[in-house]
Amino acid sequence: MRKIKEALRLCWDLRLPVRQTAKSIGVAASTISDLLYRAKVAGLTWPLPESLDNQALEALLYPAPAPSSVKRPALDMEWVHRELTRNKSVTLQLLWMEYKEQHPDGYQYTQFCEHYRRWSKRLDVVMRQPHVAGEKVFVDFAGQTVPVVDPKTGTVSQAEVFVAVLGASNYTYAEVCPSQELEHWLGAHVRALEWFGGVPKVFVPDNLKSGIQRACRYEPDINPAYHELARHYGAVVIPARSYKARDKAKVEVGVLIVERSVLAALRNRRFFSLSEAQAAIREAVCVLNARPFKRLAGSRQSRFETLEKPALNPLPANRYEYGTWMKERVQEHYHLEVAGNHYSVPSELLGQLVEGRVTANTLEVFFRGRRVASHILSRGSGEIVTNPLHQPESHRRYAEWTTDKAAAWAVGIGPSMVSFVARVVASKGHPEQARRACLGIVRLGRNYDRERLESAAARALAIGSVSYRSLETILRYDLDKVAVQRAEIAGAGNHSNIRGPEYYRSTEVRPC
């Protein structure tokens, strides 16, 4: 369903052609055409209604088909293609008539042609790529790196060089990055777009791991964060096919020019920070863009300003914020771990696979494309951040019982219970211990009335045994109904077998 919504966005919102949309999504163009037809029949418009979830959308677009008992004979597409290419006079109409002679119950002419067109699109075709102003930007890392010396230790690290080239004007952008990791790859895109002052419609990267999770000629799997960046800027990612350098010839030439005109010119300079290297590269790139063409009038700079820049889409109001994506199955504690801290998700999702997007300050959790939780990231370690709405009802009731609430409950029982609860809270070394003890005291109210609770609390205070277990024992054995004896209050100090303090004050030696 994510690809279906993306196809509708690209066709209806960005107004991309069907073929470009198909390449971006990784499906056949006929599939996109069929999807648009189904959406039109279903009466859908863009943007889709917020109340329309994935299941309802799928039911509208793909209702359960009626079972069909008719089976058509299989088509030999290789024979059809071979006959068409062997003789230019052979047509699909003639081949269909020969096919129907052998298979009278076979496909009709329209379906015969449709099946062949779908099959023929898989054939390899080499064509010259037209570059429309404002349509594509080609991006890649250069093969050469820039050495950067640490001034404190003298250690030399190799900085990567990111290159972006606009298709119609050859206007070039370059910068140094610490590595080719996803964070630096996306950050370079953001700075390149700000350098251009606008956004092209299509990003054309190579199949590097930072941008493409799984390279495939027909259906590449784009990194979710890269896909999100494209959505933020209203663009689309159409990666070059594997082992097809012609798909990104612009950036291949651009990388070569940057290596020869920029990096080679700076080969004898020593850089002690990335910012120093970036300043030098930016100066050299400005000279490159201002250099006149040899066979064309003007320069990259002049063609960009007159041809390319007016065709670029405007930058959005907010800059893209990098976020990493994670997938995790919700365990019985209904919390996800991020950087040593735990954050809650709705307990109804136990056992479900959810996606999390982590930025510098926030965590967003998604289930089937819908956001189900959002948290501000904690700066501590080992902390548990729980939204009460995510808890089961029983857990919520337990968490709501604080010592203050227990003290308020004691007021309704009587003064002895108020004193009893206050002494229990003061006797505990940790707030959680006090809360659990108070919860146990409050739950005794389910089985005993207010008078007995007050009487039991008074007895516990009188004998100096202030604890939940003491109160529970008094109530269980009906000791609250028995008068408190003097011996219980004074303890065992007056027992006849106890010598007493006078015995020990005497200095007289007594026989053992």
Image (cartoon, rainbow, N blue to C red):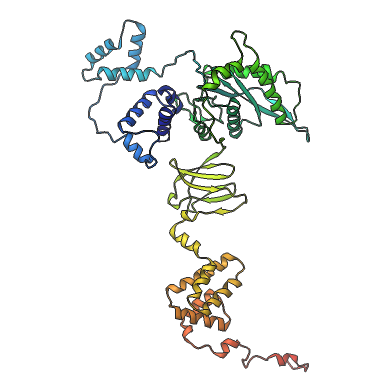
Horizontal placement of 34 versus 482: left or right?
A: left
User: In which quadrant is the C terminus drawn?
Assistant: bottom right
Taking the image as shown, residue 492 lies to the left or right of residue 34, namely right
Exactly how many numbered labels are in the figure? 0
Residue placed farthest to the left in the image?
104
- Residue 25: where, in percent of width, then height? 44, 28
Is 329 rendered above or below residue 62?
below
- 246 or 376, which lies in front? 376
- Looking at the figure, which quarter contains the N terminus? top left
Q: Is residue 209 above or below residue 353?
A: above
- The residue lying at 24 percent from left, 12 percent from top is 97
The image quarter containing residue 194 is top right
Front in this rendered view, residue 129 or 395: 129
Q: Position of residue 505 (x, y in %)?
A: 75, 91
Please tell me whether residue 355 is drawn above or below residue 233 in the rendered image: below
Q: Is residue 317 left or right of residue 81?
A: right
